Amino acid sequence: MGRYIARRLGQGLIVIAGVTVFVFVVTRMVGDPVKFMLPLSATVEQRDARRAELGFDRPIPEQFVDFVGDLGRLDLGDSTYVRNTPALEVVFDYLPRTFQLVALGMVVAVVCAVPLGVFAARRPGSVADRTLTTLSLVGLSVPQFFVGFVLLILFTVRLQWFESGPGPWTKNLVLPAICLALPAIGRLAMVVRSAMIDELNTQYVKVAKAKGLSQTRVVAVHALRNAAIPFVTLFGWEVIRAFAGYTVVVETVFNWNGLGFMAVQAIQNNDFFLIQAIVFVVAVMVVVISLLIDVSYKLIDPRVKLS
Amino acid sequence: MSLADASPGTGETLLEVDGLEVQFFTRRGQVRAVNDVSFSIAAGETLGLVGESGSGKSVTAQALLGLIELPGRITAGDVRWKGESLVHDAAATLDRVRGREIAMVFQDPMTSLNPLFSVGAQIAEVLRRHLKLSRKAARERAVELLDLVGIANPSQRAGQHPHEMSGGMRQRVLIAMALACEPQLLVADEPTTALDVTIQAQILDLVADLQDRLGLAVLLITHDLGVVAGLCDRVAVMYAGRLMEVGAVDALFAEPGHPYTVGLLQSTPRVDEVTERLVSIDGAPPDLVRPPDGCPFAARCPLAHDTCTHDMPPLEAHEEGREVACWSPFAAHV
Amino acid sequence: MSATDEHTASQHEEDEATEAEDALFGRPFELSGASTPRGLLGDLARDKLGMVSLVFLVLLALAAIFAPWLAPEDPNGGDLSNALQSPVWHGGEWSHPLGTDWQGYDVLSRLLYGARTSLFIGVAVVAVAGSFGILIGLISGYKGGRVDRWLMGWVDVQVSFPGLLLAMLLIALVGGSVLSVTVILAINGWMVYARMTRGVALTVKERPFVEAAEMVGCKPRRVVLTHILPNLTSPLATLAVLEFARIILAEAALSFLGLGVQHPTVTWGLDIARAGDHELFGNQWLIVYPGILLSLTVLAVNLLSSWLRVALDPQEREKKFAATATAGAEGAGTGV
């Protein structure tokens, strides 16, 4: 097991390396980060000065070496939006609030999706099933920012049950969490449904029934546990997708000041180093979560050989 | 001495199948997999249900315990266990009977066990459900059962998962699981088809042995006539969803009545005869979506005549203990 | 693009995982006589949701194509004196059937032109990403060996990129426009096609007839064209449609964040953002109209793809039939 983790970490490092190289190449070579950093009115001299200051006028390979060296020291530059604070520190300041959002959102998603999927799977093709399937499709078709606005309009503007912006989770996190969860519920419910349909058709489930086990036990213990395998994969991807992008949209709509919100602020304020830091940290998180998913297989499925 | 030599169990009738009909609803049409099938099994006796693939024997077995799932349904007839129906308003009865009074061993040992749970846990599960044993007691009994079915190192094996075992061993586990609550009827659906010939023999000996010890009634479903001859008291021959002939094993094999049975017996190669060509019955089973009006075997039967293609012959008692569904069965020709 | 990456990739990866597990016990990608065009249309007629979706999309596409003739006025025209007129059913005039926004822009025109942008980008990205992805997948699957490992390694790495964030960064640097959004979404989205194509290529490659063809001296290109491509159409169709839905959402999200298509190009995402900023406490219908249209479009595409998936796979069709035919007969007389 240890060897497996080491190997996956190695693969993860390659991914992180890939992301960093990509970001580096793109930011230094494709666009002009200095143009991005300074206001439009800056003069050419000001730009050149800034460029020299940051070392962006040196040959690319030299820059890259410096870049990697800085990374090693965990120095990702200083944020300009949040004055005089290392970019990495800013990231870690805002990360916890995004964690909260994703945590609550994913809890809501799982709690809703699993029962829905199981219920739909018991009688595939029935009216209940087709309704649930269509609802799931609706859930994952509606754009999140629109759902967010609808929720905002209904529950904060008109009914005033909740508020937007940062605040205690009961008043401010529920709506964004629901908003984040909605397409996830759609996708996860479909996965649970199809996995459960497959499971309920297996021979061992039939054997379990023949043994006289209660329907509850057959479904909840035999079928569900096996269905957990594809579910965990998809669930992991939902978490990754949330961190890697959905939180940006949801946090913006609800003014929830987590990392996604900061990402937009950073871009709007031309804070190059902060954006770079955010991208880097998120890439690392994605790698870690992937690894956790893979490891969790072993816990569920004794057949898996991780070598 | 094989069990077939002893007198067949003359205990009470445990299982009665009465005009059972099972249909499957597919895009191509309705398939009548089991058509007006009736038979009974008494305590302690072994009934073999024989037929080629697609004859409906597995479906019959599954229908007994209410295991037919969509797109299939029991559309007519009844199954009675000790007088109680297992088909109509049967939820409570089935709950009580499944795994406890009637147990089933399925065909494919590779897929019949849940890969995620240990073998011991899956046996213990039945014990805890029906006999309300404690975890510890169930675990111990599971080990005993594994020993009973001839698995070496039972306590170690109990903690293993199905993928760590061979096919033969898994089949033994399935048998152990079925016998856990000491049922009165064991329904074995092709218990040896998926196994090696040598393992087959072992498993069959095991079943016979357990039968002796436990006084079990057995419904053995198979396409292998040799297995039937070795293990069964009576045999029922199925074709295209219908029963063609039922009778005591030795008598039926010695003097078969139905032309199909004759064909089956002739086409079974014998080790002690030198034959140059394998005999087979010409033709193929009928399409069950549009079953013929008359006898389903008529198209392939060398003795068929007009009535055969129009009217289905009823399953009639001929001599003692023998029923044949044929307008001109062999005995009449003798 | 891992952010708004959807049903597509997940469904496909799920299929892939199942296939790998079954070790080719699962269904090979083979069209076994299920899909004559007439047969397909017949199936569609029976699936009402699918039919409605298709009709809706066709109408939308037509509206988008003919927008310049259908729109009451230039979406960026209109003056403040016309601001905030109500839609017709609230007492507005027919010159602005859906009313105007606070800048005097005609809502209907903006919806129509927005459809053009969204549908165009969707088609363009699918075409570009699809072509590139299929090419890579074919090379990877057919050649195998080191080439395969490297290419798939690249796919694996890129798949793990935080898609939306990178897209945001790129567009911020390069500037938002229909072209940049298309290119960047394509860069982020070709991997699914590559993986799927590679899967098909691998399956087909194993078949004896391919070996035979090679022994006879058929050039690789011929093998690819005659054997692999036909088996590709079915899964590709389903995938492309799903991706199309995903791209529409992705573009809308980017535009919503101000990092996609820019004014004066019209897109629904941008309109939702502007209205959200301006009219959250006021004329909320200005937020809702583009949102509903966007949702309906994506929903229609998803419904269509869902139907397509069943229609192109004979096993799925059988299952569906079995389910609906006996839905009324559940559990009759069989106990549990």
Image: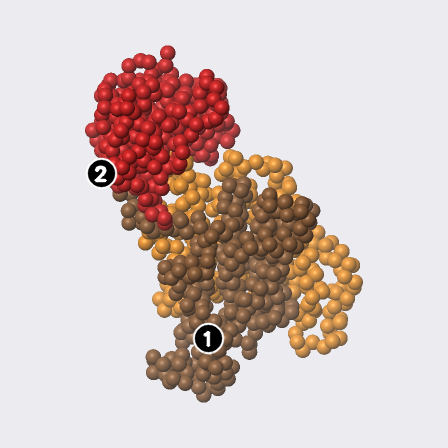
**Residue A210 vs residue A246: left or right?**
left
Viewer-closest of A187 and A144: A187
Kindly state the secondary structure of the residue where label 1 is placed. Answer: helix
Could you give the CA–CA distance between mark 1 and mark 2, rounded to whole angstroms?
58 Å
Does the rendering let one see residue B132?
no
Q: Which mark is residue C63?
A: 1
Chain coloured red: which letter?
B
Amino acid on which the number 1 mark rests in the picture: Ala
Q: Residues within 10 Å of mark 1 (few under 14, many from 20)?
A: some
The spot of residue A50 in percent (x, y) is 73, 69
Amino acid on which the number 2 mark rests in the picture: Asp
Residue position for label 2: B89
Query: Quadrant location of the N terminus of chain C?
Result: bottom right
**Residue at image coords 33%, 13%:** B5
**Quadrant of res A278:** bottom right
What colour do you see for chain A? orange
Viewer-closest of B303 and C126: B303
The spot of residue B158 in percent (x, y) is 46, 25
